[in-house]
């Protein structure tokens, strides 16, 4: 006969850790799963190989589900995470126009509604995730421990990285020519934003040593009671 169930509930700290790991690895895996192609955008992987598409869509679905379950510390954070969850799901299920290229005569293709939804959702996602980084910073700032101060600096750096990446992408859209620097601008912008997001949420999980003191550290316990 089964005994008492293990205490295996996924709390918001575990959620942050899992989301952080996925966000950190997504850019790397989509690049690796498109052999022979130097992808110009993470979203482009959707159109190239089945494995890359499955990882791309699957990872975003997991992130979306965890964001939907996250309520944070206020009604504002709860609503914000739900909006972010919808935006992440939209990025997964509405493919980008990045593979449409141009017509044979060189004329640019008209953007599709699906592509517009994808782009607007991606922008909304990164804006909200940057806001969360700042909210994490404000929470860490109010604590006295040196570990909390370190976490606060990490959150600020991640927020600045995400805003900076979005700014570069905006300048590219407005016509600033970055071709002399890289042909993979969008990929690096997306990778920077995702990795900053991943670092911030793994930091906020309070499971990492050195930046979390013993009293605050969260440990996953799988032992029965």
Image (cartoon, rainbow, N blue to C red):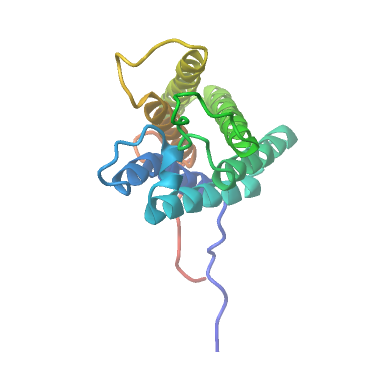
Instruction: Please identify the quarter of the rendering in which residue 28 is found.
Output: top left
Instruction: Tell me where residue 141 appears, x and y as whole percent.
Output: 53, 22
In this view of the protein, which residue sits in the foreground, 138 or 81? 81
Q: Is 30 displayed left or right of 135 in the figure?
A: left
**Number of numbered discs on residues:** 0
Instruction: Please identify the quarter of the rendering in which residue 142 is found.
Output: top right
In this view of the protein, which residue sits in the foreground, 34 or 11? 34
In this view of the protein, which residue sits in the foreground, 150 or 200? 200
Instruction: Tell me where residue 77 appears, x and y as whole percent.
Output: 67, 35
In this view of the protein, which residue sits in the foreground, 100 or 125? 100
Q: Is 177 displayed left or right of 216 in the figure?
A: left
Q: Residue at x 46, y 46 (%)?
A: 17
Q: Residue at x 38, y 24 (%)?
A: 185
Q: Residue at x 44, y 34 (%)?
A: 194
Regarding residue 92, the answer to whether it shows in the image is yes
Name the residue furthest left. Answer: 36
Position above or below: 82 against 223: above
Instruction: Tell me where residue 113 appears, x and y as whole percent.
Output: 65, 36
Name the residue furthest bottom. Answer: 1
């Amino acid at each position: 006969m089964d005994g008492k169930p293990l205490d295996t509930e996924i709390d918001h700290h575990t959620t942050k850790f899992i989301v952080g790991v996925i966000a950190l690895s997504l850019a790397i895996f989509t690049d690796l799963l498109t052999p022979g192609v130097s992808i110009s955008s993470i979203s482009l992987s959707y159109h190239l190989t089945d494995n890359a598409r499955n990882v791309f869509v699957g990872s975003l679905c997991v992130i979306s589900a965890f964001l939907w379950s996250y309520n944070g510390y206020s009604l504002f954070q709860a609503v914000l995470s739900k909006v972010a969850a919808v935006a992440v799901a939209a990025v997964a299920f509405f493919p980008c126009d990045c593979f449409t290229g141009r017509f044979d005569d060189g004329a640019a293709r008209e953007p599709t509604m699906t592509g517009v939804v994808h782009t607007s959702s991606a922008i909304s996602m990164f804006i909200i995730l940057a806001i969360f980084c700042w909210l994490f910073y404000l929470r860490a700032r109010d604590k006295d421990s040196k570990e909390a101060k370190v976490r606060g600096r990490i959150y600020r750096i991640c927020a600045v990285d995400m805003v900076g990446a979005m700014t570069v992408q905006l300048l590219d859209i407005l016509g600033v020519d970055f071709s002399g620097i890289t042909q993979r601008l969008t990929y690096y912008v997306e990778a920077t934003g995702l990795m900053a997001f991943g670092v911030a949420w793994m930091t906020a999980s309070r499971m990492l040593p050195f930046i979390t003191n013993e009293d605050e550290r969260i440990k996953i316990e799988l032992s029965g009671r």
